[in-house]
Amino acid sequence: MTYLPRVLLSFAIAAPLVAQVIQLPDDNFDACTSIMVSRGASSDGSVMITYSADAAFLPKLLHHQGGKHKAGDLVDLVAWENERVRGQFRQVAQTYSVVGLINERQVALGETTTGGRRELRNRDGLLDYDGLMWLTLQRAGTAREAIATIDSLCTEYGYGSGGETIAVADKNEAWVLEIIGRGPGVKGALWVAARVPEGCISVSANMSRIGEFPMDDPDNWLYAKDVVDFATAKGFYDPAAGKPFSWRDAYHPNPSASSKRACATRVWSVLRRASPSTELSPDFHRGVAGAKPYPLFVTVDDKLSVRDVMGLMRDHYEGTAYDMTKGLSAGPFNSPLRCRGLRFSVDGEQYAWERPIATQQAGFVMLAQCRAWLPDPVGGVYWFTPDDPYTSCFVPLYCGMTRLPEAYITGDYKQFSFDSAWWVSNLVSNLTYDRWSRVLPDVLAAQAENEQRFVAMMPAIDQAAAALLETNEEHARRFLTDCSVAAADRLFADWRTLAGGIIAKHVDGYMRDGQRSRGVGYSEEWLRRVVKEQGRQLALPKAPGAGEGDR
């Protein structure tokens, strides 16, 4: 995502020692995570990609109605991230309908910001990454067409963002595309794209993932024709050094220790969960000298269902040495919440909280599922949730739908609204964060109930919609729209009920169980820490006779 304004330095004095505590500017912490799943790695043969849009803003679901256009037509591009008009662009003869970030041909895109060499940023380019993705989805009928369209749009209008990784999927293939500009005032982009091998997955989390690559395998690797010559001319690569060309070394050199911690840890965690047998070391994301970056692809140990992939996006490194629900920083109720900024300094030593895949600043998270065995309007499903995926719920929206659910296009970041799915999802999340171990079971139960119901109902919807398409496309699209909107409306109502239920059940430090309320207290582990720090202050004097007990 585009970086947010950074936190100013703050200072605190801790007694009895005079200790300087400094909050440092974040480095790629407010950014995104994408997973790419090949057809052979999924349990049902679908291609899947995910995208967590991690920044503090209220995104609304977007819809483009495709159609035919006249020669010479121009279109105003209003990008989805900040709803700012980027400029006018030449319209094409035919555009496809788009729901969120999947189009009616089952082409889907996601992204993560990788930064790269700042001197290659062209701020005069009309296309930032979000506008580039939005136009591409309207114009591309396959993943390979999407890659070609991205290249041609950048050449015609200029690319204005920094380095990005764009996840590209259609019903047959998943691709990893890394792209960067050519410098101030220069149109076009440099890029390389890799097809995810069958049976494998890939993941991107704000660091370049492509190193050396073959230049004679167009079935699996595509790239800008001058990607090596440009790097050589700029001094980013020396052919005489005798080392093969590496995209990462040329265009994204020397990642910082904080970037490795925040970004490579996410990559490691997805790969270690999907492929435990690979036994990836934590050394690279912990900044151990000489440790190698993680492989671009791994073969999954067991094929992944759609809910498995959702689960990969719900990760705080549980069960590892970096588990964010453990330790003093998790508080008395084992919360994974770490407030921004994530880097800080105490007495001259620098530290960083862990940066998880599931994060509170997610604007939305999507999972695009592309299924080749079904007609395109039925086969493409856009699983969407506002806010943090760990405490929210995905709803399936068919790519053939023609109308969006009202609650998912309602809201303003500046003002809370019970009519906005984004705000209600945030309400549930924020009611959970500070009392995680107490409230989370209620949230996970509601989440599982809804998502499992959606998955169970889809085969019947698929069958009915595919049959309708054979006789009346308009009726089929209306049916898909009605099913998608009804599912979203039902989920929104359930989530509002859940928010009220959390408040009623977990109130004032008590937990209600039917008509009874009981104090929840604290764990023995937490109490021992309290006693270690404040025991003298809290200790009761020893005296003969029974105590009076709590009052």
Image (cartoon, grey):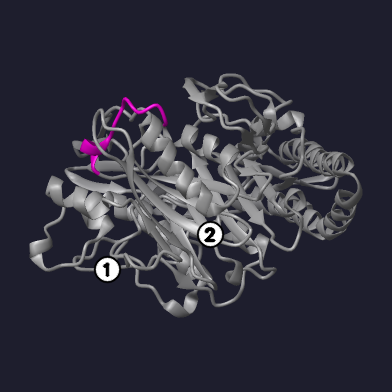
Report if the CB atoms under discs 1 and 2 are less than 8 Å apart.
Answer: no
| Residue 119, magenta (yes or no) | yes
Inspect this view and state whether residue 551 appears: no
Left or right, 140 with reference to 494: left
Q: Is residue 17 above or below residue 355?
A: above
1 vs 2, front mark? 2
Separation of marks 1 and 2 at Cα, in angstroms = 25 Å
Say which of 139 and 294 sits in front. 139
Residue sitting farthest toward the front: 71
Residue 180 occupies which quadrant of the picture?
top left
Q: Is residue 275 visible?
A: yes
Residue 193 is drawn in which quadrant? bottom left
- Read off the residue under disc 1: 292
**Position of the C terminus by quadrant:** top right
Rendered residue at 30%/52% (across/down): 225
Category of crowding for the residue at label 1, using alpha-carbon neighbours closer than 10 angstroms: few (below 14), some (14–19), many (at least 20): few
Residue 270 in the magenta stretch? The answer is no
Identity of the residue drawn at 31% across and 27% down: 123
Numbered label tally: 2
Residue closest to the far bottom: 277
Secondary structure of residue under mark 2: strand
Could you tell me residue 320's position as x and y percent? 45, 67
Mark 2 highlights which residue? 174
Q: Position of residue 272 (x, y in %)?
A: 46, 70
Q: Which quadrant does the N terminus fall into?
A: top left
- The x and y percentages for residue 204 are 43, 55
In front: 157, or 433?
157
Which amino acid lies under the numbered mark 2 shown in the image of this protein? Ala
- What kind of secondary structure does the magenta stretch mostly adopt? loop
Looking at the image, which is closer to me, 24 or 531?
24
Where does the magenta region start and end? 117-127
